[in-house]
Amino acid sequence: MTINTEMDVRVAKITPVAEKVKRFRFERMDGKLFPVFSGGAHVVVAMRDGDILRRNPYSLMSSPHDQSAYEISVLRVEHSRGGSAFLHEKLKLGDMVTISQPINLFPYDVRGRKHIFLAGGIGITPFMAMMDQMSREGSNFELHYAVRDRKHGAYWQELTDRYGAHRVKIYVDAEKLFIPVDALLANQPLGTHLYVCGPSGMIDGVLGKATALGWPKQNLHSERFLAPPPGNVFKAKLKRSNKTITVGTHQSILEAVEAAGIDAPYLCRGGACGQCETSVLGCRGEIEHHDIFLEPDDRNSGNKIMICVSRLKGDEITLDL
């Protein structure tokens, strides 16, 4: 269960924008305008795939000023859990899906005197809405966008044409052009804020270098949605619901709880927001923490788990649900 009202939408347009990347445009079924959102926001898309209800978060990349439609871009991920495959291969023009109200866990800091965006691959999507908003507001920003090769890099030409090569820098792995992270981070004025979205290795590397160079923690921002990893089957006893459920190999605890007809709170479904934090009342096995929210002390205590991405290596876990 989200804390927001969900909206039924239809697929108004599907556009291939790069190899393995498609853009989806959604319009409301009731004909009303969408809620206003801010750059960096995401929605959770609920997709009925046969007997399975899939819920995946995607960044909104359309203009925050356009309330007529919402747009997302989706990378077709090999060996995915099914969300990207469903969107790329099964969702058709005119089909209906349900989306959450926009949620922003990655807003830009309006106090920043300058904003530097570092994007890798499909990590470009939240920055597209941010740049649209900041351009209208006259904010000082620049984008450094790394792609594997130009045919896989979505929107790089469009962004360069719109904002100019002085504000949009493109780096191509296949051409041995890489973001000069050290030089970039070492030569910025006070009040600069840094935002990173892309593969986990890229995010960790950039934030690690920024921290080592003395960047204030409050000036560093990142976003990543983690997919629940596969694992062994185990039981989850839900104390308040008085139920015992089975969590499958390719199923998160949150998904298993929902499949059993029990509501559990969430916002991101990617281990980042903390909304699905659940108390552990008992455990026969080892908790495998895959989130980026819990502090080390909370993980080590064994008393908390993020049920959207973390799981058990063992037989049974008892939860306060």
Image (cartoon, helix red, strand yellow):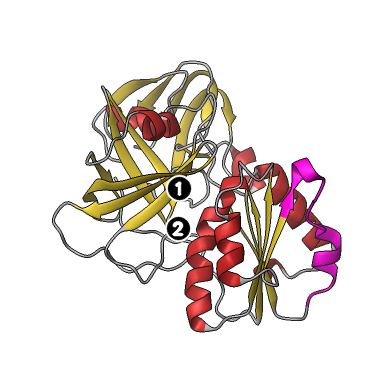
The reply to whether discs 2 and 1 touch (Cβ–Cβ < 8 Å) is yes
Residue at position x 61%, y 42% in the image: 151
Residue at position x 82%, y 58% in the image: 180
22 in the magenta segment: no
Quadrant in the picture for residue 187: bottom right
Q: For this view, does 315 lie left or right of residue 200?
A: left
Amino acid tagged 2: Met
Which comes sooner in the sequence, label 2 or label 1? 2
**Foreground residue, 207 or 8?**
8
Amino acid tagged 1: Ser
Residue 149 picture location, percent across and down: 68, 42
Residue 228 picture location, percent across and down: 50, 32
What is the distance, in whole Å, between disc 2 and disc 1 at their CAs?
7 Å
Which stretch appears magenta?
171-188
Residue 213 picture location, percent across and down: 84, 65
Q: What kind of element bears circle 1?
A: strand
